[in-house]
Image (tube, helix red, strand yellow):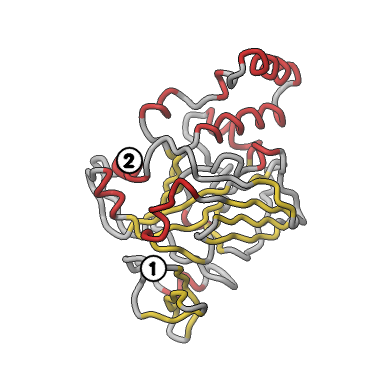
Amino acid sequence: MRVRRVRAESGIDWQVHRDGDWATVPDSPLGFETPFRPEWELGLHDGELLPFQPVSFRDFMLFERHNIDAARGWLKRFGPTAAVAVTSAYEKLARRPFPLFRPNKLWYRQPIYYMGNTLTFQPSGAPVRTPSYTRALDYELELGFVLKEPLRDATPAEAERAIGGFVVLNDLSARDVQMPEMRSGFGPQKAKHFASSLSSTAVTADEVMPKLDQLTGTVRINGEVVARPTTAGMRHSLGEVLAHASRDERLLPGELFGTGTLPGGCGMETGHWLRPGDRLELAIEGVGDIRHDIR
């Protein structure tokens, strides 16, 4: 079931898509109610609303191929020419990725994630302003999922049943700032926290889970399709990542999680970087889409 929220005289209404039209419903179809006051949420954005205001945001990295291709793309954009030549020659001869392009060893043992800034999430349609401190603005197409029930020390099966819905997620990144921050040992900061975005619609979990690893995404820049990523190839199941996050830690309804970038779902992988004046469109079939003008 497709779900959205709209402005109403009473504040914010929930709506579901039925028989080709939107109908207002009294309660959240996602299985949880937002803890935030409507007047506060309405003051955050003009135009379309987020399908929910996240309580928190953990972004995982579930796709090895994304890490490998993004590392290669980073070197091509920011590294010395000699290093690009050496790694290219190695991969051509060995017919496998350059070892340092692969994720850290911990990634193979357990799910890894960073905590993002929920207060700078933008709805689809909002303009994205390029931070003054970057010359390498990038998008990241991800599948997001939100909890409808609390978890603590959950099994993967219990955790999977607690998912309330799915959204399209865009983890905007300042790539020239990201690497120095991550090398500090404290993870991404200004490289990530300036903005992220969600589709204006969510889809209930029952529609997405049966085809979770078969979804296809689309990236368009100025109307041109530059990538068609898919959700195939996750290292861990969503139940496993939630079970890991809930280990000796209480998770609450409304907390948002991301799969990490779908392979091919960012400009650093494909060479299609964002510039002021661009029109960015991200979509995942059966889930939703995000549209932004870049300024």
Q: Which residue is at a point 44% across and 65% down the rendered structure image?
A: 52
Vertical order, 271 against 200 (above or below): above
The quadrant in which the N terminus is found is: bottom left
Q: Nearer the viewer, residue 183 or 125?
A: 125
Q: Is residue 76 above or below residue 215?
A: above
Query: What type is the residue that disc 1 sits on?
Result: Phe
Disc 1 residue crowd, few under 14, some 14–19, many 20+, Cα 10 Å: few
Q: Residue at x 58, y 51 (%)?
A: 217
Secondary structure of residue under mark 1: loop
Q: Residue at x 57, y 24 (%)?
A: 101
Side of 29 relative to 76 (left or right): left
What residue do we see at 45% from left, 38% from top? Answer: 234
Asked whether 151 or 64 is in front, the reply is 64
Which label's residue is closer to the chain start, 1 or 2? 1
| Residue 150 on image: x %, y % | 26, 55
Is residue 12 positioned above or below 154 on the image?
Answer: below
Q: Nearer the viewer, mark 1 or mark 2?
A: 2
Q: Residue 161, position in %: x, y? A: 28, 54
Residue 115 position, x and y percent, is 43, 44
| Residue 48 screen position, x and y as percent | 56, 71
On the rendered image, what quadrant is the C terminus found in?
A: bottom right
Amino acid at dot 2: Glu
Q: Quadrant of residue 294?
A: bottom right
Q: Mark 1 and mark 2: span between their CA atoms?
A: 29 Å
Which numbered disc covers residue 36? 1
Q: Which mark is residue 240?
A: 2
| Count of residue discs | 2
